[in-house]
Image: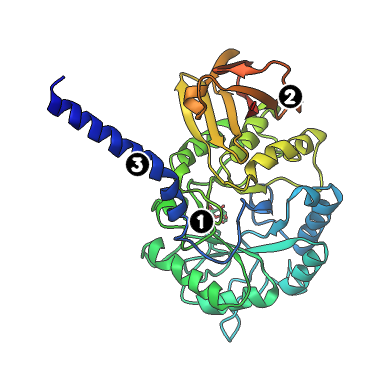
Amino acid sequence: MGKRRCAVVALLATIMAVIMELAPLTVATSRRNMLTNGLGMTPPMGWNSWNHFGCNIDETMIRETADAVVSTGLSKIGYEYVNIDDCWAEISRDDKGNLVPKKSIFPYGIKVLADYVHRKGLKLGIYSDAGYFTCSKKMPGSLDHEERDAKTFASWGIDYLKYDNCNTDGSKPTVRYPVMTRALMKAGRPIFFSLCEWGDMHPAEWGAPVGNSWRTTNDIADNWESMISRADQNEVYAEYARPGGWNDLDMLEVGNGGMTEDEYIVHFSLWAISKAPLLLGCNLRNMTEKTMKIITNKEVIAVNQDPYGFQAKKVRMEGDQEIWAARLSDYRISVVLLNRGPVRYSTTARWGDIGLDPKTEVEARDLWEHKTLRTHFVGNLTATLGSHSCKFYVLKPIA
Ligand code: GLA
């Protein structure tokens, strides 16, 4: 190699080294540009009415759901939000322009319900829309009423607002959503702000200063294809997730009956490792033991709630076999080995793919078996997986 070429190579190597040095700094710096309401430092956990109940909601059901969050022990492991979705208001505002809770289903209004939920140590969420009507068209949206509605929500004691994107004036979400952000900031109560424009305008790219989470996908349905495709669509935005601002791949379907137990385990695992909001979407008043076992897996929840907030990426894909991984606090790595195919298959997580030095020896904790494996692993870890199933490990380097 000529002297000149050597010098160029050396220079490039130095530049690369500096970039590698600066990489963590870039991540840290980008975290500055965000909504400073202090909420969502870990992904929100709770329940939302839409996936199971649609418009079929009322005060009794919401109260009973709040009761169930406590009586089943869900509140003890972090589930706190009880979120009312679409269809809670009358179709017309009152003569002052205020939203009015629908008398036939919320006869005592929302404040009384919020007080009830707060007395249980939980938080109440509500839903509106950055358009003239919500998606159901059964109630008004908040477009042109943002300040009034934000004040109303604050006065009722609302803790979380999901903000949808139907029936708009045709302007971009990047224009309409920040109006509600400012209105909430002025309303005098910290309210988690969940942007729901379904990923249309890549909200991961502009959502951090606007909201605490942003939907990256269209509505989920209770089947494998729908669930897994949402995980794929959301994964490409992994770099944007951070404490205070999360990619939201829609609410959970676990317990609604459309998938097998293994598929629901994959669903919960991918949502957890993707640092997604864990918003349950089944009927909490009537859950099977299998559903409870999935949604109460504390070790999986701990990955979701890890203080670093790094969202997993797909680090290897070979046919139907995939490896998803994300760094955790305490030098640990979370990894999901996934078989998306129709037959049993063996798959391998390689250290080079998941950010470990190939010589590192690790201890592996199996989060669904609740067992630390006896063998230590160096370089890779292989598991045999049934169709539509996964393994979820936390790997800890041995000092
Ligand atoms: C949209 C949202 C859903 C739900 C419905 C309610 O489709 O994406 O999550 O809120 O509206 O109408």
Above or below, 1 against 150 in this view is above
Where is residue 38 shown, x and y percent of the image?
A: 59, 64
| Secondary structure type for disc 3 | helix
Q: Is mark 1 within 8 Å of ligand 1?
A: yes
The residue that appears at 46% across and 19% down in the rendered structure is 318
In the picture of the structure, the residue carrying the numbered disc 1 is 196
Left or right: where does residue 345 sit relative to residue 167?
A: right
Amino acid found under the numbered disc labelled 2: Thr
Seen in the image, is 355 located left or right of residue 7? right
- Report how far apart the C-alphas of labels 2 and 3 lie in the structure: 37 Å
The residue that label 2 is drawn on is 372
Q: CA distance from mark 3 to mark 1?
A: 35 Å
Residue 292 x %, y %? 78, 38
Amino acid type, label 1: Cys
Rounded to the nearest whole Å, what is the CA distance between mark 1 and mark 2? 39 Å
- Viewer-proximal residue, 125 or 164? 125
Q: Quadrant of the N terminus?
A: top left
> Tags 2 and 3 in contact by the CB under 8 Å rule?
no
Mark 1 or 2: in front is 2
x 62%, y 51%: residue: 42
Please say whether residue 343 is visible from this viewpoint: no
Which quarter holds ligand 1? Answer: bottom right
Q: Residue 208 location in percent, x, y?
A: 47, 58
Residue found 53% across the figure and 19% down from its top? 359
- Circle 1 SS class: loop
In terms of image quadrants, where is residue 339? top right
* Residue 19, numbered circle: 3
- As shown in the figure, which amino acid type bears the numbered disc 3? Ile
